[in-house]
Image (cartoon, helix red, strand yellow):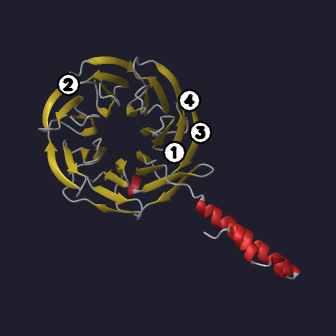
Amino acid sequence: MTDSKNFFREVPIMRLAGYTKLFLVITLLAAMQAAGTTAMAAEPLAVAGGSFGYVFEVSKGHSLDFSKLDKVHSKTVYASAYRDGLLLTGDKKGRLAAWNLKKKDGEILEDSHRGAVRSIAFSPDGSLFATASKDRTVFIWETNGLKHTQTLEGHDSYVYGTDFSPDSTLLASVGSDNKLVLWDTKTWEESKSIDAHYNAIYAVRFSPDGKTLATASADKFLKVWNVPDLSEKWEVLAHDNGVYCLDFSPDGSLLVTAGADKTIRIWDAATGKELRHVENPDSVSMNSVEFTADGKFVFVGDDSGDILEVDVEQGTIVERGKADTAVKALAVIN
């Protein structure tokens, strides 16, 4: 980019006649403004997927701005995960795509699911990722080469959520059979399974220290379980309708949930005490929530197309934007 100070020194503006001088000054100011805008262009904060196969990069302007990525999916995108420049998305047809965000394009992976992909989770070191599907299976993939290596069959119905433990020794999965299943990642055998809720379980997350995990369900409950025996630590009737998504703060002190009652609720992860809640009356159903790396904010996506940035300490919405489609999946990328 041209140094504006040097540029002004090199052009003898004061020697030019009036109209020519005015025109040149206006041109230079416009060029400087354009250069500044380019230099200050917002980096993507998150990626969202939703109806009609759309995938968006989300960045901050005066509000949240959206830019479409190349159209790879033809059906609703229900799942996404991001790590080290690699974005993974999964859709209603069972297709998985891998995206290079620098090139802004994606490609469909081979050997994918036969039912909708509802969850994608990277292992802590990024060498593996797991995908959960309505075909009743969990697939294990090698990130290098994007190769499907294992198929886990332990659920009697749709699998909605999956997550790796922080030490990579366990994988958790949940589904519409009300089951919470733990898998041994050395053998890929089932190590523990319980009937954890009274209705379909939509989400599961390990705490950052790996000592507990949380589950969210259509039965309106949020539950926290001790690992690895899956004894219940606490439960709370969390929402007035189904709870569709949850996430732990990076330090493990907070849990955030959202769902069909148009509210975002912030909990003390140790006790289950509700600390704050945020209402969004214009919402239809909140499908995805994820913390930023600093633990100060969460992004939330919903069926109305809203993406909200919420300050978890203040319990307020600080930014919002609206996509052209329902937002079913969300991944924070920086």
Q: Which residue is mark 4?
A: 315
Q: Quadrant of residue 119?
A: top left
Spatial separation of the CA atoms under disc 4 and disc 1:
17 Å
Mark earlier in primary sequence (4, 1): 1
Question: Callout 3, which amino acid?
Answer: Val
Q: Which mark is residue 42?
A: none
Q: Which residue is mark 1?
A: 306
Residue 329 drawn at (x, y percent)? 39, 46
Q: Residues within 10 Å of mark 4 (few under 14, many from 20)?
A: some
Q: Are marks 3 and 1 in contact (CB under 8 Å)?
A: no
The correct choice, above or below, for 131 with respect to 275 in the image is below
Q: In front here: 248 or 84?
A: 84
Question: Callout 4, which amino acid?
Answer: Gly
Question: Callout 2, which amino acid?
Answer: Ile
Q: Residues within 10 Å of mark 3 (few under 14, many from 20)?
A: few
Residue 290 drawn at (x, y percent)? 43, 39
Q: In front here: 193 or 322?
A: 193
Q: In front here: 5 or 332?
A: 5
Q: Which residue is mark 2?
A: 194
* 2 or 4: mark nearer the eye: 4
Spatial separation of the CA atoms under disc 3 and disc 4:
9 Å
